[in-house]
Amino acid sequence: MHRSNSGGRKEQNDRLLYEILVTIFASLNIVDLAAASLVCKTWNKACRDPSLWHKLDLSTLTSYCFNTPPNKIGAYRRSSSKITQFLKHVLSLSNGNTTCLIFNYYVYITDEQLIMVAERTRKLKRVVLPKTGDFSRAGVNSAMTLWRGLESITITSAVPGHYIFPALGRYCNNITEMKFSCGCIFEEKHAEAMVKYTPKLKMLSIRSIPASMKALQCVLRFLEHLKMVNVCHSFIRDTSDRRLYGLGFDDLRNCLSPLSLGKLIYCEGYLEGGWCLRCQNGHDNSRSRQPYGPLEDVWREDEITSLATGNHNILPSRTPLWINRFRTN
Amino acid sequence: MGERGEEWEAVMLRKAEEEESKAVKKVKLVTSDGVTMEVEISTVKEMETIQAFMNATDTDNSIIFPLPKVSSHILSRIMELMSGEYDQELVKRLSHEELKEICMVANYLNMKTLLHLTASAIANLIQNKSVEFVRHFFNIINDFTPEEEVQLRKTHEWAFEGVDED
C-alpha cells in the first residue's frame, strides 16, 4: 500500500507543497525552523514565509551549543561566533518581517549583536531583552534609532536604566508597555525617567522585583495614561526608612489614593496560596534552569498577558485585579 | 407489555426513517486504486474541496467523486481519525508514510483540523533532528550544489551539532 518506488517518491516529494510546509513549519521552534531551511531549496523558500516570522522567539533555543554558560566570561566566549551566525541566518530568513522579538534569557548578547539584530528588525514593535549581555550607551542608542516603532519593551539589568530611558525618549515615542525585570530595582530615578521619557505608558510590570514606594507613587501620579501596574510579589519598601521591611496591603492603602489602588495588580500570597502566576505555577527549580531558575520565570511570565513571552502564561481564572478588594475595605 | 411494544415499534420506525434519510445523503468517493467508498454527507462537510464542488453542482444524492490522489488505505485511515474525533493517540499509531500521505490529502481536500493535527505531528517528528535525517525522512533530494553545501556547513555549524541520534 505504501509508495516505495522511486517514481512515487519523486512525485510525493513534489507534492509536499509550499503551503503544507509552511503549516508544518509553523509548529517548529526557531532552531528547527532554521535547520529546516538547510534541507533543500524548496524548504528554504517555504522557511521564508512572512507568517513564520512575525514573532521571533529565541527563548526556545534548546540546542546544546546555545546552553547557559557557567559565568560571564564563559558566556562571552561561547556566545560570540555561533550565536552571531545563527542570528544572521534566522534574520535573513525573516526578511525584516519580525514585529515581536524575544531574546533568550541566558544567551549572552553583545553590543555588535544587538545592533546587527536591530538592523534586520526595523519593523519591531516589541522587544524582550536578555538577562545576560553587556550593552554600551552607544550600542543602546544605535539599536533604538533603528527601532523607532517600538511600543513595548522588557528591560533587564543587562541594560542600565540611564542608557535605555534617554534613548527611548529620543527615538521611540510610542512606548505604551514596559516591564522592569530581573536584576532591576525600581527606584525613583527610574520612575522619573519614565515620566520624562515614556509619557505614553499604559501598562507597567515590576513584578517580583524590589521597588520603592515613592517610585510607585510617582508613576501612578504623573503617568496620566497608566492603566495597570503589576506589583505581584514586588518587594515594595519606603526608601526613607532605613529598616528593610516590605510594605504590605494596609500600607499600600494608606499611601495610595483609591484611584491609584485600582490600577494595581497585587497578590497577597507568600510563595504559595495566592492567585498569581508565581503562586499557581511554582518556581522552575530544575537543574537546567539554575542558577537563575526562579528569575527566568519572573522574566518570562506576567499577569499582564501582553508582557509575557507567550509560552506557559496561562492566567488563573480568579480575577487578577484587586480593585474591589481595595475599594470595599 | 403492549404499550412497550408500541413504543419499541415507534423507535424502530424512527430509526428506519433516519436511515432512509441518511441513505439518500451519501457520497461515493472513488479512490486511486479504484475502490468506491460510501461516506455520509456529514463526513464530506469537513472536506471543503468536495463540499465546494457539491455546492457548485447542486445535486443532493448519488454523487460520485473521484479522488485520484488518495488511496483506499489512506482514505480509510482518515475515516478512522474522523470518527475518533482526531484523537492524538490515533495519530501516534500511524506510520510515518501514512502521516505524510494524510497530511497531503488533508491539504488537497482542505480539511483544516486534520491538516493542523498531522502538520504538528510531523513537526514533532523532525524536531531536533539532523538535516540528513530530515532529507531521508521525506525522501528529499538535496538540490544544493556541492559548493553551496560546503558553504552551508561552514556557516551553520550550529545546525549540525547537538541534534538527536538519527
Image: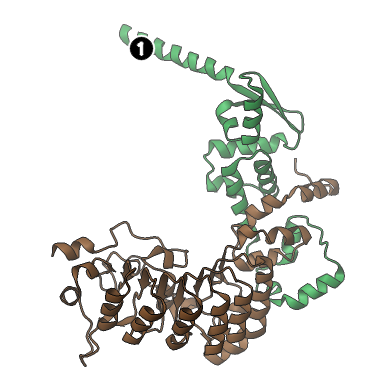
- Residue positioned 81% across, 45% down in the render: A8
Chain under numbered label 1: B
Q: Which residue is mark 1?
A: B7
Q: Going by the image, does A321 lie left or right of B82?
A: left
In this rendered view, identify the residue nearer to me: A152 or B113: A152
Q: Is residue A167 above or below residue A93?
A: below
Q: How many marks?
A: 1
Image x and y of residue B63, in percent: 67, 22
Does any portion of residue B1 appear in the rendered image? no
Image x and y of residue A117, in percent: 61, 76
- Rendered hue of chain B is green
Label 1: state its secondary structure: helix
Q: Quadrant of residue A165?
A: bottom left
- Rendered hue of chain A is brown
In this rendered view, identify the residue nearer to me: A112 or A72: A112
- Residue positioned 81% across, 70% down in the render: B149
Q: Is residue A57 above or below residue A195?
A: above
- Residue positioned 54% across, 79% down in the render: A144
- Residue positioned 45% across, 75% down in the render: A154
Q: Going by the image, does B20 lie left or right of A9?
A: left
Q: Residue furthest left?
A: A329
